[in-house]
Image (tube, grey):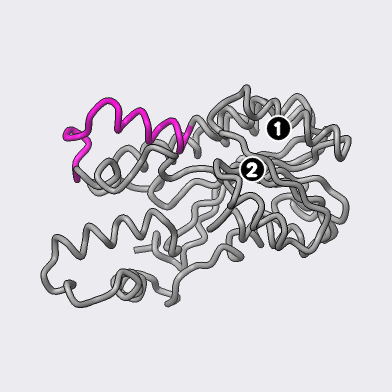
Amino acid sequence: MSLENKVVLITGAGRGIGAGIARCFAAQKSKVVITDLEQSLVDETTSSLETDAMGLVADASSQEDMKKAIREVSSKFGTLDILVNNAGVGGPKIEYQEFTDTNAALGMSDDAWDEQLRYNLRTTFSSSNAAASQMNDGGSIVNIASIAALGPSTQLPAYGAAKAGVVHLTRSLALELAPRKIRVNCICPGLLWTRAWELLTTRMKQNQKELANLTLRQIFEGVVDSITPLGGEQTPEDIGNLAVFYSSDEARMITGQVVAVDGGITLR
């Protein structure tokens, strides 16, 4: 499974899952381009990759930003083989109250709803739209959704709806791009220690007295242990390893597929 010298663009890769995906492609000696909203995150992650790497500040929900980024990628590397749509969760304006002030869809403001869909669904649409015409035929698009897309939730209604949209968009793009042999697949991560879980465990600690003396990380680990059949949390590299496989020749006949990397959580 060789992706050496393949050019991969990963959105939202300054930290967390995206950074882990970048490390997995770097291990394959791919040429890795990461985008994020903060220059410091871009610089830190790019400098840590042991491969030919490039970092760009870009808003993945903006076609204009992503077209500009792809022009820079083309200028440096001359091509684009793989797109990983990872950017999501909060966006620059989503802070604690906006992310956790309701536990029901009907309690959300229009602005909170729109912000979640912008940074968890439009990111995938805008980046794919900007990149597809520039990608090599036979390339790969990997969309990162969430297990929240696979079932209803009163905890994260807008987030879940947006990620369900990513699943649907994956299948639509897979059909649209099939004549060019561009494969489009989706990964639904389970429980990883990310910014979203920092916000969720903060809310849990405030609302559940029995958790008052636990750290946020301890609360998260308790949730993981209680609902994961295989035991243990998932890691960014668990997601990255599947993204690498999806993008390889070994997966040349796999498209429009959605796989949960969740230790069996969605089996319950």
* Location of residue 138 with respect to 126 vertically, above or below: below
Count residues near mark 2 (Cα–Cα under 10 Å), then give few for <14, some for 14-19, many for 20+: many
Q: Residue at x 76, y 60 (%)?
A: 26
Residue 153 visible in the current orientation: no
> In the structure shown, which secondary structural element does the residue marked by tag 1 occupy?
helix
- Kindly tell me whether residue 233 is visible in this rendering: yes
Tell me the magenta residue range: 102-121
Q: Which residue is mark 1?
A: 69
Distance from Cα at disc 2 to Cα at disc 1 = 8 Å
Instruction: Check disc 1: other Cα within 10 Å, few if <14, some if 14-19, many if 20+.
Output: many
Type of amino acid under label 1: Ala
Residue 78, percent across and down?
A: 88, 35
Q: Is residue 58 left or right of residue 102?
A: right
Going 74% across and 31% down the picture, which residue do you hit?
70
Q: Quarter of the image for the C terminus: give it.
A: bottom left
Q: Is residue 192 left or right of residue 170?
A: left
> Which residue was labeled with disc 2?
35
Question: Mark 1 and mark 2 in contact (Cβ < 8 Å)?
Answer: yes
Say what secondary structure mark 2 lies in: strand
Q: Is 268 above or below relative to 249?
A: below
